[in-house]
Image: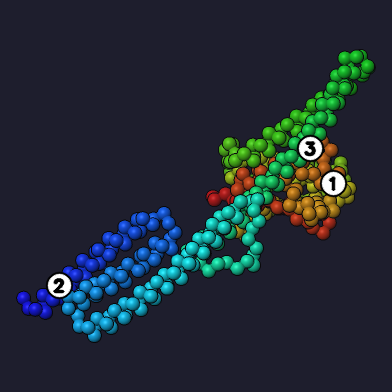
């Protein structure tokens, strides 16, 4: 074996051994600082290779494997590299630490009680990964705030519903109690008429309880009833026949526009859909003044979905109230509130439509308002 080859093997062995020793020391330091700031771990990880190379060069110089001139040049380069690595490590770790602090502040802002970061606030420069986490935190906080607002709105709606229902139940119960006491004291001479009045009062209460049960059913999740193939055109025509006599008594013209060559087939529950569409139509007839017009239009959307529109001549709904009309217990002015209702008709209609994977909306027109219902068409 030549002298040059032996020197190369020795140099290689010294370099490998030195790197192993420095690496073992670095691993020990990393283990000791595993619970410390990431800044110290980054400094150890970056400087360890440079120190290992410098130590290997020093040892090789000491054993005279390198000339003095070469060793001086290498040591100068290693010194500059060591200083540069230390400076860059301090800069990067400072950014990471600042980003981690900003991330912690962002997590604390998830609490709804704390104010959100202003939109124009300058964020601390941070790595892309931490910036992505910060953006996700901001989006999460926005979603939490929206969910909290919806929860508060739902709670307020429940409170309003309980208040209305308490009033609606207290009034007929008070009447029934007064009627029962009068019958007990013999103060009523026309007992058959009193019984008719009691029966009517009980009927209104039964309707109210049935509406509450229906609302809880359609809002509680997917309906338990089996969906079958239905024709929306036939449902609309049958519903118009049922409401026509009531519309004539109110002096309201009922106009029905349905296609002749399309049954508008969907998959659903006939009773639920009749009730939902019936609530829309009866509300439209009730709130339309005499000589007004209620129009029911059924057709198919360009995408294939089935659409039903109910328009009336009620004069419209105040714009601030439009987002509330489908809330349980919501009531508008006296002209838009049934005398014996609890404000559940539109809430039930929305629950039924949504349980059929459909959409319902309301908007004002020139002389009234229009309710639009879209239902997915039957795949067949």
**Comparing marks 3 and 2, which lies closer to the viewer?**
2
Whole-number angstrom distance, CA of label 3 to CA of label 2: 94 Å
Task: Give me the residue at 78% from left, 30% from top.
Answer: 205
The mark nearer the N terminus, 3 or 2, is: 2
Disc marking residue 10: 2
Residue at (87% x, 48% y) in the render = 289
Q: Name the residue under label 3.
A: 164
Which residue occupies the extreme front position in the image? 62
**Closer to viewer: mark 3 or mark 1:** 3
Measured as percent of width and height from the top left, residue 308 is found at 69, 51
- Find numbered disc 2 in the image and state the secondary structure of the residue it sits on: helix
Q: Quadrant of the N terminus?
A: bottom left
In whole angstroms, how far apart are the C-alphas of marks 2 and 1? Answer: 98 Å
**Residue 329 visible at all:** yes
Q: In this view, does 93 lie to the left or right of 246?
A: left
Whether residue 46 is situated above or below residue 236 in the rendered picture: below
Q: Which of 183 and 309 is in front in this view?
A: 183
Disc 2: CA contacts within 10 A as few (<14), some (14-19) or many (>=20): some
Label total for image: 3
Whichever of callouts 3 and 1 sits on the residue coming sooner in the sequence is: 3
Residue 276 visible to an observer of this rendering: no
Describe the element under mark 1 as helix, strand or loop. loop
Against 336, residue 49 (above or below) is below
């Amino acid at each position: 074996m030549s002298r040059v080859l032996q020197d190369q093997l020795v140099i290689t062995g010294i370099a490998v051994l030195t790197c192993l020793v420095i690496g073992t020391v670095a691993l020990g330091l990393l283990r000791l600082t595993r619970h410390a700031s990431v800044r110290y771990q980054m400094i150890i990880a970056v400087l360890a290779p440079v120190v290992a190379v410098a130590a290997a060069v020093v040892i090789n110089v000491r054993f005279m494997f390198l000339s003095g001139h070469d060793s001086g040049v290498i040591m100068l380069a290693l010194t500059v590299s060591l200083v540069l690595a230390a400076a860059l490590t301090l800069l990067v770790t400072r950014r990471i630490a600042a980003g981690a602090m900003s991330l912690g502040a962002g997590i604390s802002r998830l609490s709804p009680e704390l104010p959100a970061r202003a939109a124009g606030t300058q964020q601390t420069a941070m790595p892309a990964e931490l910036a992505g986490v910060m953006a996700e935190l901001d989006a999460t906080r926005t979603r939490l705030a929206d969910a909290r607002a919806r929860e508060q709105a739902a709670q307020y709606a429940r409170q309003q519903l309980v208040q209305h229902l308490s009033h609606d139940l207290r009034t007929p119960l008070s009447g029934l109690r007064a009627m029962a006491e009068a019958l007990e004291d013999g103060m009523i001479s026309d007992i058959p008429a009193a019984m008719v009045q009691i029966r009517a009062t009980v009927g209104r209460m039964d309707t109210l309880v049935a509406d509450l049960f229906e609302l809880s059913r359609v809002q509680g999740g997917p309906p338990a009833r089996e969906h079958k193939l239905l024709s929306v055109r036939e449902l609309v025509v049958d519903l118009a026949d049922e409401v026509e006599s009531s519309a004539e008594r109110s002096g309201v013209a009922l106009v029905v526009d349905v296609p002749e060559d399309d049954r508008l087939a969907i998959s659903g529950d006939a009773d639920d859909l009749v009730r939902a569409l019936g609530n829309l139509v009866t509300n439209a007839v009730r709130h339309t003044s005499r000589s007004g017009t209620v129009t029911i239009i059924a057709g198919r959307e360009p995408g294939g979905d089935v659409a039903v529109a109910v328009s009336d001549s009620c004069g419209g709904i105040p714009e601030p109230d439009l987002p509330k009309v489908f809330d349980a217990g919501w009531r508008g002015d006296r002209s838009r509130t049934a005398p014996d209702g609890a404000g559940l008709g539109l809430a039930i209609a929305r629950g039924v439509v949504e349980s059929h994977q459909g959409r319902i909306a309301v908007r004002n027109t020139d002389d009234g308002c229009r309710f639009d219902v879209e239902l997915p068409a039957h795949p067949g």
